[in-house]
Image (spheres, rainbow, N blue to C red):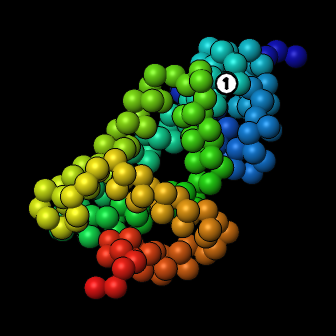
């Protein structure tokens, strides 16, 4: 029997897409370069041209996840309007991504904190934070939100959105969409009576 010829125009993309499906369905422990090669119809050694080992595959998955999320967050940050409208847009994007890609987001944060995380991953995380920081510093500049350390404000916003996504995992997207504006409004106005 002769081996099947290599037909993939972009084997790396095929492997990453398959890995992301496996991650979502069965978790990171189920990821295997050999199994991904079998699914792609290539030799078991072919993935090594793109990923030296499973850690490199996990890093690549985290990178692609942060690239997608960062692009969407930057687009939301550019939404015309005031601080509240921009924050609502960013919140919808983040929560939608978190609910639709829970396993990937877990992996993204796990690899971000790994001691051997690649420099590119750290840079992408910085760009994601820049999107959030940009809207906060602009809101402070225009007087729409209180002055203070924008890093603390960004951490508060990010923590609230991640917590909201975690608490609503498994909920129907329309349920989360209905609750999110109220959560963002409380975040913007604070808990103290006015």
Q: Quadrant of the C terminus?
A: bottom left
Left or right, residue 2 beside residue 76 = right
> What crowding class fits label 1: few (fewer than 14 Cα within 10 Å), some (14-19), or many (20 or more)?
few
Please provide percent x and percent y for residue 25.
Answer: 74, 51
Residue drawn 36% across the image and 74% down it: 190
Q: Where on the picture, by quarter, is residue 115?
A: top right
Q: Where on the picture, by quarter, is residue 136?
A: bottom left
Please provide percent x and percent y for residue 118.
Answer: 51, 22
Q: Where on the picture, by quarter, is residue 5?
A: top right
Residue, disc 1: 55
Q: Quadrant of the N terminus?
A: top right
Left or right, residue 72 beside residue 1 = left
Residue drawn 48% across the image and 30% down it: 121
Q: Is residue 143 visible to us here? A: yes
In the image, 20 versus 107, the foreground residue is: 107
Q: Is residue 78 visible to us here? A: no
Q: In this view, does 191 lie above or below 2?
A: below
Residue drawn 55% across the image and 80% down it: 175
In the image, 45 versus 107, the foreground residue is: 107
Residue drawn 13% across the image and 56% down it: 141
């Amino acid at each position: 029997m002769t081996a099947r010829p290599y037909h993939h125009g972009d084997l790396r993309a095929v492997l990453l897409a398959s890995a992301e499906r496996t991650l979502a369905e069965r978790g990171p422990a189920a990821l295997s370069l050999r199994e991904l090669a079998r699914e792609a119809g290539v030799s078991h050694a072919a993935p090594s041209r793109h990923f030296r080992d499973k850690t490199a595959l996990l890093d690549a998955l985290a990178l692609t996840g942060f690239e997608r999320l960062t692009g969407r967050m930057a687009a939301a940050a550019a939404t015309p309007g005031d601080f509240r409208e921009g924050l609502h847009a960013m919140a919808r994007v983040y929560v939608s991504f978190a609910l639709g890609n829970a396993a990937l987001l877990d992996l993204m944060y796990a690899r971000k904190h790994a001691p051997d995380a690649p420099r590119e991953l750290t840079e992408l995380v910085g760009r994601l934070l820049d999107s959030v920081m940009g809207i906060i510093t602009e809101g402070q500049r225009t007087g729409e939100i209180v002055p203070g350390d924008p890093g603390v404000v960004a951490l508060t916003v990010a923590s609230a959105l991640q917590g909201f996504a975690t608490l609503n995992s498994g909920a129907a997207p329309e349920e989360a969409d209905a609750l999110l504006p109220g959560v963002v409004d409380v975040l913007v106005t604070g808990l103290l009576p006015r």
